[in-house]
């Protein structure tokens, strides 16, 4: 064990003196030291219950003969950060979380880790850290919130953002907006639809890094506390068997995660996070594999914002394991991969049952025969862009229309609310990419404004920024290369015709090559000069979106 080099022997007497300063007995020092990475804070609704999860993990570790030691990780609430400067900081925290966790783990020599994340960047950041430090690790999230109820119907945060658009359009009054505001988010937990947090917590199960129910057991259920205790116990088994993250997150496991992503209809942010995790694992990840998998993977779930079901419904229907069991019927998964249970994926899901085929469609009755996410390419995005096609209305799968171009999210929102966007338009928001933003803000506010005003089946939106998992409609993000790095999106003008064909994975600017060359000679690329601190460092170092918007561009 790592502990042996830090605790045992005469040379380590100074270390032991500091452990005594912590109140650790000789008996505790003699056991495996298990770091518990707590993402608890009092500003993120998905994290306000993590203190209880952490206490349960500590108990589980101690019950199994280990010594639990807690240290923190930061987390940002993307919902609270949405629509203002705060969103520039969301994505960069993923790397800050990975880096700071690496520093804490390697500085203190833990034998194993239990990661306790929940929300959007917190989960992939800790998965990246787990791969990087590569000591036995298990994850247990805080769980999703229960769906809200407005006018007798279940609802979630995406509806809340759309309600603002409906209010601006005069479709609801201030009183109804207030009713929505007070009833949409009724409990702690990660937002109740298949948004980014829940997407990544579900994919953590698929990757083999979390126990059954990690992605779906609601935050307020006592079963979540039991799960945390079992995670604490299980880390001791992983330490004993020396099963490590890179033993688990293999190329086959990452492919399984991408396959499940398609079936579940996960957030487009997964197409940033899976490449970033793969990078830390030393696994090659090409965006084109997404379409290859999508072509043969049916979309089985339509959770909010794609449909009227929520995480609590998925949990009651059998959870992630039931979805995986359906996928095995078409031999779409490698079930031989090892997981944090110490068993193979096949062994884990052997007894899984789909209890509600309305929530988890059967393999012979999918929503669509293709997966929930598509990667488009064309002259506008030669390195790729991403759309959650499971949340696109059928009539918008193919769309051609004139561009309305904006150099920031704020400009676009003002135009939408000002009635300047009409049916048929393609809204273009640029200089919001990883480097150009910097920070690659989520465009939930403009997409929700479009949906709330009833234009989501008539208007498309493309951006070098990204989208919340709560976004629906023909919203195409991650345009690569981004504007600040000379991507064609920097040269689009108002009125240019943009052609989108999601079934054929294409996106084209219908402007002649000669005209594009002429524009490049006279158009100045806009760079922000007023950025400081972490944002400035991120802008200088970050990769393009198709590479996962990562800082540490290395393989394992």
Image: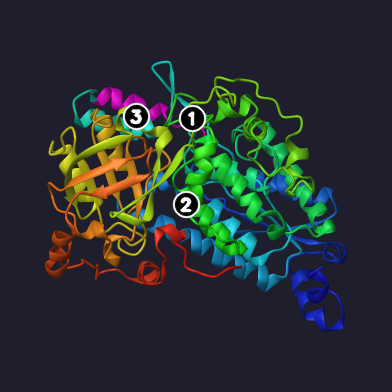
Q: Nearer the viewer, mark 1 or mark 2?
A: 2
Look at the picture and state if 126 lies above or below 293: below
CA gap, disc 1 to disc 2? 25 Å
Looking at the image, which residue is at 30% across and 35% down?
A: 398
At a point 24% along the width and 35% down the height, the residue shown is: 459
Mark closest to the chain's N terminus, 1 or 2: 2
Residue shown at 70% from the left, 71% from the top: 108
Local packing at callout 2 (Cα closer than 10 Å; few below 14, some 14-19, many 20+) is some
Residue farthest top in this picture: 152
Q: Secondary structure at mark 3?
A: loop
Q: Relative to 197, is 546 above or below?
A: below
The residue indicated by pointer 2 is: 288
Residue tagged 1 = 303
Q: Nearer the viewer, residue 336 or 483?
A: 336
- Tell me where residue 305 appears, x and y as whole percent: 42, 32
Number of the label disc, if any, that sits on residue 103: none
Farthest bottom residue in view:
11
The residue indicated by pointer 3 is: 393
Specify the segment rendered in magenta.
174-188
- In the rendered image, residue 19, in percent from the top left (x then y), is placed at 76, 70
| Depicted 238 relative to depicted 503: above or below | below
Dominant secondary structure of the magenta stretch? helix
Badge 1 density bin: few <14, some 14–19, many ≥20, Cα 10 Å: many
The picture places residue 313, in percent across and down from the top left corner, at 56, 25
| Circles 3 and 1 in contact, beta carbons < 8 Å | no
Q: Does the magenta segment cover residue 132?
A: no
Quadrant in which residue 170 is drawn: top left
- Camera sees residue 164: no
Question: Coloured how?
Answer: rainbow
Q: Is there a contact, CB below 8 Å, between mark 2 and mark 3?
A: no
């Amino acid at each position: 064990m790592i502990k042996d080099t830090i605790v045992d022997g005469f040379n380590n007497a100074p270390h032991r003196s500091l452990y005594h300063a912590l109140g650790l007995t000789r008996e505790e020092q003699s056991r495996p030291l298990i770091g518990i990475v707590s993402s608890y804070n009092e500003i993120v609704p998905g994290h306000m219950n993590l203190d209880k999860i952490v206490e349960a993990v500590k108990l589980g570790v101690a019950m199994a003969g280990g010594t639990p030691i807690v240290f923190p990780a930061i987390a940002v609430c993307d919902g609270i950060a949405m629509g203002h400067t705060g969103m520039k900081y969301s994505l960069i925290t993923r790397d800050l979380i990975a880096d700071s966790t690496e520093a804490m783990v390697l500085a203190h020599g833990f034998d194993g880790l239990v990661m306790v994340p929940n929300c959007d960047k917190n989960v992939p950041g800790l998965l990246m850290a787990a791969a990087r430090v590569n000591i036995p690790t298990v994850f247990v999230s805080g769980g999703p919130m229960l769906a809200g109820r407005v006018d007798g119907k279940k609802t979630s945060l995406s509806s809340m953002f759309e309600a603002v658009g409906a209010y601006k359009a005069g479709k609801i009054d201030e009183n109804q907006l207030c009713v929505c505001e007070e009833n949409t988010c009724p409990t702690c937990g990660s937002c109740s639809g298949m948004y980014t947090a829940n997407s990544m917590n579900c994919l953590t199960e698929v990757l083999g890094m979390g126990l059954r129910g990690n992605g779906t057991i609601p935050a307020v259920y006592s079963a979540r506390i039991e799960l945390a205790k079992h995670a604490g116990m299980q880390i001791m088994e992983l330490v004993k068997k020396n099963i490590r993250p890179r033993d688990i997150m293999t190329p086959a496991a990452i492919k399984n995660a991408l396959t499940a992503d398609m079936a579940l209809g996960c957030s487009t942010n997964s197409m940033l996070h899976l490449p970033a995790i793969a990078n830390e694992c030393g696994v090659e990840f090409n965006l084109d594999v997404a379409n290859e998998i999508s072509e043969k993977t049916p979309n089985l779930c339509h959770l909010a914002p794609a449909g009227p079901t929520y995480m609590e419904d998925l949990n009651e229907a059998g959870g992630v394991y039931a979805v995986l069991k359906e996928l095995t019927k078409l031999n779409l998964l490698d079930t031989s991969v090892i997981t944090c249970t110490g068993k193979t994926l096949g062994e884990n899901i052997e007894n899984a049952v789909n209890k509600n085929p309305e929530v988890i469609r059967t393999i012979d009755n999918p929503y669509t025969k293709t997966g929930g996410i598509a990667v488009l390419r064309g002259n506008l995005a030669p390195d790729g862009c991403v759309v959650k096609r499971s949340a696109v209305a059928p009539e918008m799968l193919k769309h051609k229309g004139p561009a309305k171009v904006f150099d920031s999210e704020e400009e676009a929102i003002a135009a939408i609310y000002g009635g300047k966007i009409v049916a048929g338009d393609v809204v273009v928001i640029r200089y919001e990419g990883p480097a150009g933003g910097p920070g690659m803000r989520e465009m939930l506010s403009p997409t929700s404004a479009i949906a709330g005003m009833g234009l989501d089946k008539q208007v498309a939106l493309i951006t070098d920024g990204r989208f919340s998992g709560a976004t629906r409609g023909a919203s195409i993000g991650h345009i690569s290369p981004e504007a600040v790095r000379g991507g064609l999106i920097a040269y689009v003008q108002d009125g240019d015709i943009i052609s989108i064909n999601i079934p054929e994975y294409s996106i084209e600017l219908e402007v002649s090559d000669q005209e594009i060359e002429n524009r490049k000679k006279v158009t100045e690329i806009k760079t922000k000069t007023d950025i400081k601190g972490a944002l400035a460092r991120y802008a200088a170092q970050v990769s393009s979106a198709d590479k996962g918007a990562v800082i540490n561009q290395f393989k394992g």
